[in-house]
Image (spheres, rainbow, N blue to C red):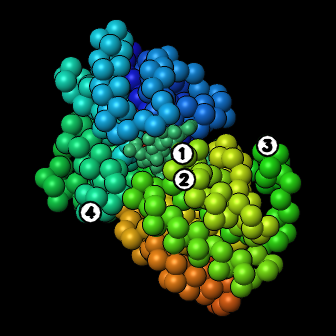
Amino acid sequence: MKKKIMCVFGTRPEAIKMAPLVKALQQAPEFECAVCVTAQHREMLDQVMEIFDLKADYDLNLMRPGQTLTTITTGVLEGMEQVLRQAKPELVLVHGDTTTSFAAGLAAFYQQIPVGHVEAGLRSFDPLSPYPEEMNRCITGKVATLHFAPTAQNVANLAAEGVTKHVYKTGNTVIDALHCMVQPGYTFRSQQLAEIPLERQTILLTAHRRENLGDGMRQIFAAVQQLCAAYPQLQFIYPVHPNPAVRRPAQEMLGSLPQVHLIDPLDVQDMHNLISRVYFVMTDSGGLQEEAPALGKPVLVLRTETERPEAVQMGTVRMAGVQTERIVQLARQLLDEPAEYEKMANAVNPYGDGTASVQICAALKQYFGL
Ligand code: UD1
Ligand code: UDP
């Protein structure tokens, strides 16, 4: 009898990192794998589903304009109760730190279905930053029975909390995804992106985190304004998150700068190939902190903390914070000092060799005694 596994995700980053695992589970004869999307994100999730050719067996279709953490949480809890009663999986897999992950994990726990946490053990140690993701991943870790930790540091973080049973160090599935997506000579699908001349010195920017909304975002955008004024040859590409709380200030502060290209969110394949072609990356994203180092690109992190210290320790990622002055100073160093740039532009990859999904499948077989 095949073991029934359900993968649940709802946002863009979860989908990107769960897609290679879904594929691996679907290919393993020991498992029957169902996909349930909460659609906490709609367009951005659907883009990933399309690129990886994934079909949802269940779709809660939750996204609403102006959704709050509470409405997402209650929607996932209530929706998952129905889905789990109907589908009766023997294990539920959730990913990372989103509200979908923790609420779906809790819904499974309420029905005493074991939960496997993919990308387990990351910690910033500040419950309010990233907010609410740090708490989401801690709670998910509490309800989970199996923990798939990308790095030795993540395993150690779990051990420090007393979690040592069913902990597997597997690498991060983001590297599996990168391996399928990045291709030499790749042609961008996005028309907006295809029209931008990448021969110019290009910085890729992403910024969307809740704790940066408001002042943080304005400080970041002021740094971009100053850098554009100081370096006329420079250009920024900023695929803007659809959240109106991000779109509005981005448009207001950067919309009229000819050196800044505000474009729609990119599909994951365009994004991964774009990273491989830019000069460096400035971001408050979690996933990009893993992807850019793997592709040899320096990263300035627009946050005050990180739950991904590995690439910082290896020198490819620097914490730039959310103060205009420091962001400008670190960017200037990369632009003005070739030796500094070379020091950071080494391809380092503490997140695995692209076999995380296969390793997670093997761990699941072991867990089920197959
Ligand atoms: C969520 C995750 C965050 C992850 C991010 C990836 C939580 C608490 N946070 O935050 O960890 O980094 O996703 O992007 O789960 N929207 C659209 N279309 C979309 C997606 C979003 O219009 O396809 C808009 C909606 O107006 C929505 C808003 O964006 O209300 C915010 O989305 P939400 O899922 O609440 O939070 P994120 O900041 O995206
Ligand atoms: N990403 C994408 N298109 C974009 C911006 C990001 O495909 O326009 C990808 C990016 O490569 C990474 C993931 O989305 O894999 C990161 O998502 P996000 O920044 O939304 O969330 P986080 O990683 O912070 O959870």
What amino acid type should be assigned to the residue bearing mark 3?
Arg
Q: Where does the image place residue 274, in percent across and percent down from the top left?
A: 71, 57
State if disc 2 and disc 1 touch (CB < 8 Å): yes
Q: Which residue is mark 1?
A: 243
What amino acid type should be assigned to the residue bearing mark 4?
Asp
Q: Is mark 1 within 8 Å of ligand 1?
A: yes
Between discs 3 and 2, the one toward the N terminus: 3
What amino acid type should be assigned to the residue bearing mark 2?
Val
Between discs 1 and 4, the one toward the N terminus: 4
Alpha-carbon neighbours of circle 1 within 10 Å: few (<14), some, or many (≥20)? few
Which quadrant does the C terminus fall into?
Answer: top left
Instruction: Identify the residue at image location x=68%, y=89%.
Output: 336
- Please say if 315 is above or below 180: below
Q: Which residue is mark 3?
A: 189
Of badges 4 and 3, the one in the foreground is: 4
State if disc 2 and disc 3 touch (CB < 8 Å): no
Which residue appears farthest toward the top when viewing the image? 86
Between discs 3 and 1, the one toward the N terminus: 3
Q: CA distance from mark 4 to mark 2?
A: 23 Å
What amino acid type should be assigned to the residue bearing mark 1?
Asn
Task: Give the numbered dot on residue 126.
Answer: 4
